[in-house]
Amino acid sequence: MAARSTADADFEPAKTPKRSVPTHRITLVICILETITIIALAIGLGIGLDRRHSCINVPDQAEATPATDRTSSTPTKRSSKIWQPTPGTTWQIELQDPLANSKLNVAVYDIDLFNNTAATVSTLHAQNKKVICYFSAGSYEDWSPDHDRFDKSTIGNPLKDWPGEWWLDTNSKNVRKLMSDRLDLAVQKGCDGVDPDNVDAYDNDNGLNLKVSDAVAYVTFLATEAQARNLSIGLKNAGTILPQVESLMQWAVNEQCVEYDECELFESFIQHGKPVFHVEYPESAPSISMQDVDKFCNPKGFSTVLKKLNLDEWVYECAGS
């Protein structure tokens, strides 16, 4: 409760018969004039008026609000707008070329950030589909539109079996600035979320001495930057760091957990009401046998699709996975 003004507490009516203006009224008038002046200056300067600087003793209705909520200079995050899908959400992933088929009966498309336009995203949105935009967050690709903006010192060893790609120093300010720019591009194109790939350099011969702790720090950075832009984000593979970063993620994108016998690592996403967008690459694709279905369409609760390794438009959706 605010304290009473000392002037009000000590005030006594004048004993002379002279009709003079009471002191407390003069004080009140001065306070009102002072407050009006402060408000006028605040409006002119474009700043807010803090009620604690007013001499008028008005009860503060926000007194019960924690001080950190009232005085923080950090802009309010519109987290309520961040898209959170649920387990079992159907999906298609097509990264090879610009999207060829937008008519599949699925709820989510995972498409390449650079290969597709804002018009493509709008087309999908018009069909009430959500759009995840893929980009490699941990590798240098010599074909990406921004490849000439990477400092040479940030480039490590080549990715095995992926010509034209090299590991990146994810601790580099240069790399992080370019990834922030890619997130801005995702916003400009209207993406609902992002699928940042190659965040598991620690598990590869990266040539940059990147460890698990570096991956945790980098994924945390990406999540913070994405969500500040109202973009959802998923963990791509990298099961080793899942316990440290799952709370920051809205989903997981997993490749070949059946093949590598690691699906149980990602079950916590399902337990916490988040989907696992799961893909396997049968050698026989696009010819799929019942044996393939029995083997790969197994993880319960996962949103499983079978694809060719080049991730073109062909897809086999595992029913009821």
Image: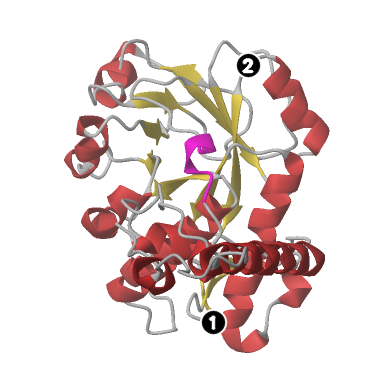
Above/below status of 137 relative to 295: below
Q: Is residue 1 left or right of residue 43?
A: left
Q: Work out whether residue 168 or residue 4 is closer to the camera in this orientation and state it.
A: 4
> At numbered mark 1, what does the secondary structure look like: helix, strand or loop?
loop
Give the magenta-colored segment's residue range.
77-82
Residue 258 in percent (x, y) is at: 26, 36
As measured in the structure, the alpha-carbon distance from the residue carrying label 2 to the one carrying label 1 is 38 Å
State whether residue 127 appears in this view: yes
Q: Is residue 281 left or right of residue 190?
A: left
Q: Work out whether residue 50 or residue 28 is closer to the camera in this orientation and state it.
A: 28
Magenta span contains residue 80: yes
Above/below status of 148 relative to 240: below
State whether residue 164 appears in this view: no
Disc 2: which residue = 128
Image point (76%, 69%), residue name: 41
Residue 189: image quadrant is: top right
Q: Work out whether residue 68 or residue 311 is closer to the camera in this orientation and state it.
A: 68
Magenta span contains residue 31: no
Disc 1 residue type (three-letter): Ser
Q: Residue furthest bottom?
A: 153
> At numbered mark 2, what does the secondary structure look like: helix, strand or loop?
loop
Disc 1: which residue = 172
Q: Work out whether residue 315 or residue 200 is closer to the camera in this orientation and state it.
A: 200
